[in-house]
Structures are given as structure tokens and as C-alpha cells.
Amino acid sequence: MRLYNPANRHDRAPTWRAEQPEGRWRVYEYDDLIARDKASLDIFWVKDDSLADSDNLPPPGVIAQEIVEDLEAALEQFRLVATDLNGGSNGEEPATAA
């Protein structure tokens, strides 16, 4: 909160610099903002390490297969939950003796 300085926005101190790219407070000039496509305020400069590096992704077919496997595993988990909720039955009507 000290850097944000809500009491006096003119005394805010930026922490981002080329030498310190991890800084979170950055000053932008009006001309820089208005020059953006549609004057977008979607501004970011802090790298999110959790995002995948798109240059090192596997081929789309491999990604698709991994998604299918994850979905099938999730579906199996839901089937087990449904079985437990149905008192141990598999969710189908019990077979009747003829």
C-alpha cells in the first residue's frame, strides 16, 4: 500500500525499470497508452512462470491425446462416485428374475 500511495497518487513511486523487470508498479505515458490497438489497457509486464512456453509445446496430436486420457480418467472417477452414491450399484436398474 505504501507504493500505491492512495492518499496522493502524484507521489506514487514506480518499481519497474529495465534493470528491475520484476517490479510491479510502472508508469506509462498517455501517448504510449493511446497508441495501443483500441487504446487497450490490458497491460502486463510481469512474466507468469506458470504459463507454458509455446515454443516448447508438443505437437497438437499429442496434446489432444493427453486431453482425451485426462477426460477418460475423470469420467471413470465420476462413475465411481455415482456408483457409491447409488449404494454400490452401477446406476442401472437392477435385473429382475424372470
Image (tube, helix red, strand yellow):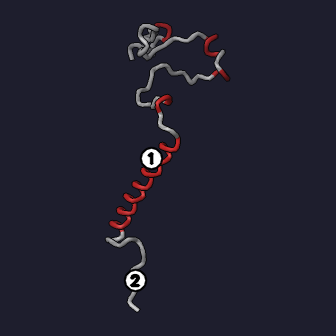
Whether residue 50 is situated above or below residue 27 in the rendered picture: below
Percent x, y of residue 78: 39, 59
Identify which residue, 42 or 56, lies in the foreground. Answer: 56
In the image, taking residue 21 as reference, residue 28 lies left or right, namely: right
- In the rendered image, residue 22, in percent from the top left (x then y), is placed at 41, 16
Residue 16 x/y as whole percent:
45, 11
Give me the residue at 39% from left, 63% from top.
79
Q: Is 44 left or right of 30, judged from the image as shown?
A: left
Which image quarter is the C terminus in? bottom left
Residue 93 falls in which quadrant of the image?
A: bottom left
Quadrant containing the N terminus is top left
**SS for dot 2:** loop
Number of numbered markers: 2
Would you name the residue on which mark 1 appears? Answer: 66
Please give the residue where the numbered disc 2 appears in the rendered image: 95
Label 2 neighbour load within 10 Å: few <14, some 14-19, many 20+: few
Residue closer to the observer: 12 or 70: 70
Task: Give the class, few, some or many, for how many residues have Cα within 10 Å of label 1's Cα (few <14, many ≥20).
Answer: few
